[in-house]
Image (cartoon, rainbow, N blue to C red):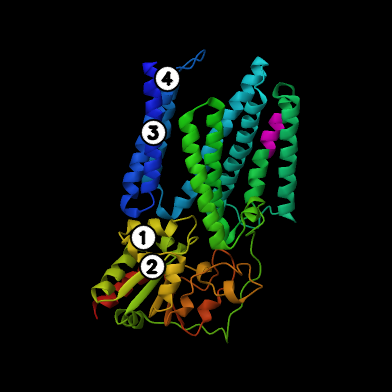
Amino acid sequence: MIFQFVINLAYLLGALAFIIGLRRLSSPDTARNGNLLAGAGMILAIIAAIAMPLPGAHNNYLWIVLALALGGTIGIIASYRVQMTAMPQMVSIFNGLGGACAVVLAGSELFNTHSTGVAPDTGSTTNILFTLLVGGITFTGSVLAFAKLQDLLGDNKFVLPKHSIVNIVLLIVLIALGAYVLMTGLEQSMTVAVIFLILALVYGMSFVIPIGGADMPVVISLLNSFSGISAAMAGLIYDNRIMIVGGILVGASGTILTLLMCKAMNRSLLNVLVGGFGGGASGGAKGTGDNVVKEISLNDAAIQLFYSQSVVFVPGYGLAVAQAQKVCKEVDDLLSANGVDVKYAIHPVAGRMPGHMNVLLAEADVPYPKLLDLDDANNALSSADVAVIVGANDVVNPAAEDDPGSPIYGMPVLKVWNAKHIIVLKRSMRSGYAGIENPLFFHEKNKMLFGDAKDTLSKLAAEVKTL
């Protein structure tokens, strides 16, 4: 009894560490400690799970320790070697591994049923099937998301005509197969259950294949939610409380974030679930006026920024690619020292995953109060002297407001054109991740400053120092 009490107490402390750690992740000032606290809770939970006696089971602790050592080593190496630009890919892989673990756990129950001939009850069978479904979708969907983010798979490849209908048909077939297994019993329909798992894996790929462009942050957030749900369902199979609590926390937070991403993208959650958005945008916004692109020199840009009263930087994926966040902070410091009010406008889906820009700027020690969300950023832009876009594209595209024919029409964007002046730092005139033209580049207020973001900002900082 005392031993069981200690185990339950360890689970409770681990769960509390998860909850407090998650709460502390809401602010960059406490995020590091929150992450460490949640990690400590996970270590405590693992120790408790290993110590939990399993009647009739053979506890091979050597294999468990070897697996922990291997996984921990891979995690440590990845944390040091993976660049900030590849963080979305790493998150996708982590989501996929979470789903794969759930599939393995549920699959082991299928194997036990097949080998013993003793089927679980209807409730347990439902848990197993649901875990296979969500875990399978998470695994293959995350692998496909990784391939897209890593440019290993183009957005338009393998997309079938009416692909959203194909996804709906696959989902209906999966529901029908699951219902058949429940009605006939798992021991009588093992082959059908295996087919169910294979189709779940196929559906995960089919679900993500048509999704591309600026919609990828929504997908990553949704798959993160799925990984938590699959973990919670696997916890129900094994009656493991810490898996249930941890899975619920990940699933709930991922779902909330998905809804926020959907709002930021002007998409419905149903639209996301059927995989019917963002697939290879075609067409797009047209340039305005005579499509004349005006450039600005480094010296002129430095003077304009140095003598402004307020400047708003708008970071995007180009900032991450160039690893320019620290140089951007240097320019910020120089301008702030001259009395310029510097802020950062953060769009919810800027970059390749939720919070991508926040992480980059936190790495550069940008104070959190300087980071403005969409509504506050648009208020600041309306009174800003200069808006400086560093690698952002789709989230500052005016076509979202004034071109009904644009694939991003209706998407809330950062209204940089309300600032008195606009400077866009960009390598070229290429379109953004959504694959559509941005008429902002031809706007009468805008001037282009071409070049690598890090190199350009370094030169800009040097120019500011001479003033």
Mark 3 or mark 1: name the one nearer the start of the chain.
3
Element at label 2 = strand
Residues in magenta?
193-199
Q: Amino acid at mark 1?
A: Leu
Element at label 3 = helix
Q: Amino acid at mark 2?
A: Tyr
Q: Cα distance, mark 3 to mark 4?
A: 21 Å
Q: Which mark is residue 14?
A: 3
Q: Mark 1 sits on what residue?
A: 361
- Viewport quadrant of the C terminus: bottom left
The answer to whether residue 364 is above or below residue 177 is below
Most extreme residue toward the bottom, as rendered? 290
Element at label 1 = helix
Callout 4–callout 1 Cβ contact below 8 Å:
no
Q: Cα distance, mark 4 to mark 1?
A: 43 Å
Q: Cα distance, mark 2 to mark 1?
A: 9 Å
Residue 344 quadrant: bottom left
Q: Amino acid at mark 3?
A: Gly
Q: Cα distance, mark 3 to mark 2?
A: 36 Å
Q: Mark 4 sits on what residue?
A: 61
Q: Cα distance, mark 3 to mark 1?
A: 30 Å
* Residue 253: percent from left, percent from top: 48, 47
Q: Mark 2 sits on what residue?
A: 344
Callout 3–callout 1 Cβ contact below 8 Å:
no
Q: Identify the residue shown where x is 58% and y is 83%.
A: 288
Mark 4 or mark 1: name the one nearer the start of the chain.
4
Mark 2 or mark 4: name the one nearer the start of the chain.
4
